[in-house]
């Protein structure tokens, strides 16, 4: 049967000060709009996790959807997403990167259903249009159901030479699978986070796509790949699987999970598998609007700009954001009753919360992680 898992464990340090230890970025009410995935129109502010969950409608039944997240966020997620029962939240006792979030889910699902095929999504994307998204995910499911050894990833047409994403080189097209014709290829190469020079060459070639961080595979197959490429992780995951559903479930998970090697599924599995005939790595091109909301500038792209390029977000209304003789500013607040005023400012990012206020030039946004490390420990 088909299942889905949303990875929701990101720390969100580049969205400080709204993203905090007790309020991760995936739970922040940042995305406006009443639709399933976009940000425009409407007055309802929803979290990225809520938006990600709503995208699964029509793809996987509600009872076969899971969220893998930090155990400390369980109660907040249960309160925010009423459709997820306690057993559908896989709580990590420690953050061990995406390989183990995937492996943990695969180990649990394989025990529940030895033939389980599951899609992996993340909680920090804004994707439109929804009908195209669902059609491409459907194609991914069908590719795996046609050949259970396939590892399917979804790629995005790059718009600039980003160095923070993985790059997927398309090889031979895949035919014979309904819905996948013209959008699916064998992967010739999978390169995680290349240098700027290589990224520029990849974009110019027209043969590469960004790795979206979304996948489809059979639970048993991805566990087999983990066993081959990261056997120390596999050994721990098998201990967790053996105890799952028994009285020792939580004890073993708490003891074993923090010892698993911390590494991404891209580095640990996808790169080596792309040159290994044992696992046919395939990609489905998602020809749609895809935005990874991992920083304040990327969040700003989800908001409508005024005539001077200024954008207002969070709970802040345009009436409470006063920008005079300024342009290309982003102003965000978690307090809709608080007024934020800018006079004669350009290219600034201003983020206000009751605990902290951030003011920085837009060009310094990538350095926010360093500032976060200096100040987060002082704020309780």
Image (cartoon, helix red, strand yellow):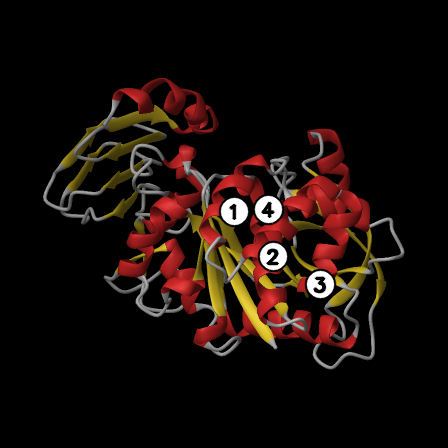
Q: Which residue, as the protein is rendered here, is positioned at the far bottom? A: 178
Residue at which label 4 appears: 100
From the viewer's side, name the closer residue of 360 and 26. Answer: 26
| Mark 1 → mark 2, Cα distance in angstroms | 9 Å
Q: Residue at x 77, y 76 (%)?
A: 146
Who comes first in sequence, dot 1 or dot 3?
Answer: 3
Q: Is residue 35 above or below residue 72?
A: below
Badge 1: how crowded within 10 Å, few (<14), some, or many (20+)? Answer: some
Labelled pair 1, 2 in contact (Cβ < 8 Å): yes
Q: Are marks 1 and 3 in contact (CB under 8 Å)?
A: no
Relative side of 193 to 28, left or right: right
Q: Which residue has dot 1 on it?
A: 252
Q: Quadrant of residue 287?
A: bottom right
Q: Residues within 10 Å of mark 3 (few under 14, many from 20)?
A: many
Foreground tag (1 vs 3): 1
Residue 104 left/right relative to 58:
right
Is tag 1's residue or tag 2's residue first in the polypeptide sequence? 2
**Residue linked to disc 3:** 220
Residue at disc 4, secondary structure: helix
């Amino acid at each position: 049967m088909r299942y889905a898992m949303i990875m929701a464990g990101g720390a969100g340090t580049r969205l400080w000060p709204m993203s905090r230890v007790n309020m991760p970025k995936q739970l922040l009410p940042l995305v406006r709009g009443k639709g399933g995935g976009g940000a425009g129109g409407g007055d309802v502010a929803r979290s990225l996790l809520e938006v990600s969950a709503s995208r699964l409608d029509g793809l996987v039944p509600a009872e076969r959807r899971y969220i893998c997240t930090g155990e400390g966020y369980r109660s907040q997620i249960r309160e925010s997403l009423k459709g997820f029962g306690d057993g559908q939240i896989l709580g990590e006792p420690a953050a061990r990167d995406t390989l183990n979030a995937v492996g943990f889910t695969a180990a649990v699902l394989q025990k529940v259903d030895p033939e389980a095929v599951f899609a992996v999504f993340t909680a920090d994307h804004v994707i439109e249009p929804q009908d195209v998204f669902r059609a491409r995910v459907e194609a991914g499911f069908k590719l795996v159901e046609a050949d259970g050894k396939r590892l399917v990833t979804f790629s995005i047409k790059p718009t600039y030479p980003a160095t923070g994403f993985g790059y997927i080189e398309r090889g031979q097209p895949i035919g014979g699978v309904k819905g996948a014709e013209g959008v699916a290829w064998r992967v010739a190469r999978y390169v995680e986070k290349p240098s700027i020079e290589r990224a520029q060459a990849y974009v110019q070639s027209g043969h590469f796509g960004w790795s979206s961080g979304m996948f489809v595979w059979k639970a048993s197959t991805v566990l087999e790949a983990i066993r081959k490429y990261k056997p120390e992780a596999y050994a721990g995951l098998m201990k967790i699987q053996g105890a799952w559903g028994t009285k020792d479930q939580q004890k073993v998970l708490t003891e074993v999970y923090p010892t698993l090697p911390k590494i991404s599924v891209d580095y640990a599995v996808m790169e080596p598998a792309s040159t290994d005939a044992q696992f046919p790595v395939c990609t489905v091109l998602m020809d749609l609007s895809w935005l990874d909301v991992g920083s304040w500038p990327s969040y700003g792209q989800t908001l409508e700009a005024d005539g001077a390029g200024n954008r207002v977000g969070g709970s802040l209304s345009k009436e409470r954001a006063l920008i005079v003789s300024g342009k290309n500013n982003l102003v965000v607040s978690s307090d809709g009753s608080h007024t934020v005023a800018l006079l004669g400012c350009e290219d600034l990012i201003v983020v206000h919360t009751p605990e902290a206020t951030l003011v920085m030039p837009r060009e310094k946004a990538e350095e926010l992680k360093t500032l976060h490390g200096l100040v987060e420990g002082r704020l309780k």
